[in-house]
Image (cartoon, grey):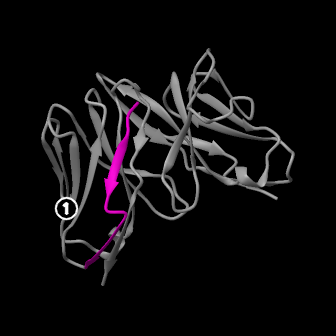
Amino acid sequence: GENVEQHPSTLSVQEGDSAVIKCTYSDSASNYFPWYKQELGKRPQLIIDIRSNVGEKKDQRIAVTLNKTAKHFSLHITETQPEDSAVYFCAALGGTGGFKTIFGAGTRLFVKA
Amino acid sequence: GAVVSQHPSRVICKSGTSVKIECRSLDFQATTMFWYRQFPKKSLMLMATSNEGSKATYEQGVEKDKFLINHASLTLSTLTVTSAHPEDSSFYICSATAVAGAQETQYFGPGTRLLVL
C-alpha cells in the first residue's frame, strides 16, 4: 500500500521567512496530493492540493510542487505569519488504495514573531 | 464546500462500555467514508473504509470485532468502540468522499474525543 514520509517533523522560522515541508510517496499510481493544516483539537483543514497532471499550484502565500518521477511533493509557505503556526500534514491517495487518504507524520511549524 | 458532522464531539465512558460515534455527510451523498484515529502529537492513522451497503474494510492491525462500522445509508456511517479500554482513548475523525465531475475530494468531520476511564 501507499506510504508517505514527511520532513521535517518540526520547523521553526522567523515571521516573514519562508517555510518548506517535503513529502515522498511510494505508490506511483497515486494521483492526488492534498495538504492539511491542523490546529490543536480541530479537524484537518485542506489548504491546498495538487493533482498528478500538474507540476505546481499556487494560492496566495502557499504553493505546492509535485515531481511525479521522483515521487515527491513539497509545500511552500512564503511571508510566514504567527497564525501559520500549526501542524501540517501531507497526504496521498488515488492509487491502488483508491480514495484512502494516507497521511504523512506531520510537521509542527512554529512561526516566531 | 461540503459539510461532514460527527456526534458526539467528546465522550467520557467507563472501561468495558461501548461507545457509538456517528459521521454524517450533510449536503452530499457519500458511498465511501473513512475512519481515522489520532493519538496526541501523532498523525491520522486510517482504521477502516466504510462502504455503503457492504462490510467495512479494515486496515492491518485494526480489530474489526472491537471497532464495529456500519454504513447503512449514503449519509451516515457509525463507528462503535466495543468494550472500550483506556488505551482506546483517542481522537476519532471520519471523512467522506464527495465527487464533483471527475474529481473526488475528502471532507473531514470535526472529530470525536474519546476518553475511557
Amino acid type at mark 1: Arg
Where residue A82 sits: x, y (%)? 33, 76
Q: How many marks?
A: 1
Left or right, A44 with respect to B83, comes to left
Quadrant of image for the N terminus of chain A: top left
Disc 1: host chain = A
Residue at 34% in and 28% down: A94
Q: Mainly helix, strand or loop, the magenta region?
A: strand
**Residue A97, relative to residue A46: is it above or below?**
above
Residue at 61% in and 15% down: B54
Query: B104 or B66: which is nearer to us?
Result: B66
Extent of the magenta region: A1-14
Query: A37 or B61: which is nearer to us?
Result: B61
Q: Based on the picture, tell me whether residue A13 belongs to the magenta stretch.
A: yes
Left or right, A55 with respect to B72, comes to left
Identify the image quadrant of residue B50. Answer: top right
Identify the image quadrant of residue A20. Answer: bottom left
Residue closest to the far bottom: A113
Badge 1 local density, few (<14 within 10 Å), some, or many (20+)? few
Query: B12 or B38: which is nearer to us?
Result: B38
**Residue A2, relative to residue B44: is it above or below?**
above
Element at badge 1? loop
Residue closest to the far top: B53
Quadrant of image for the C terminus of chain A: bottom left
Identify the image quadrant of residue A69. Answer: top left
Residue at 58% in and 56% down: B39
Residue at 42% in and 53% down: A105
Residue carrying label 1: A61
Q: Based on the picture, tell me whether residue A7 belongs to the magenta stretch.
A: yes
Where residue A23 sits: x, y (%)? 28, 50
Where residue B36 sits: x, y (%)? 55, 42
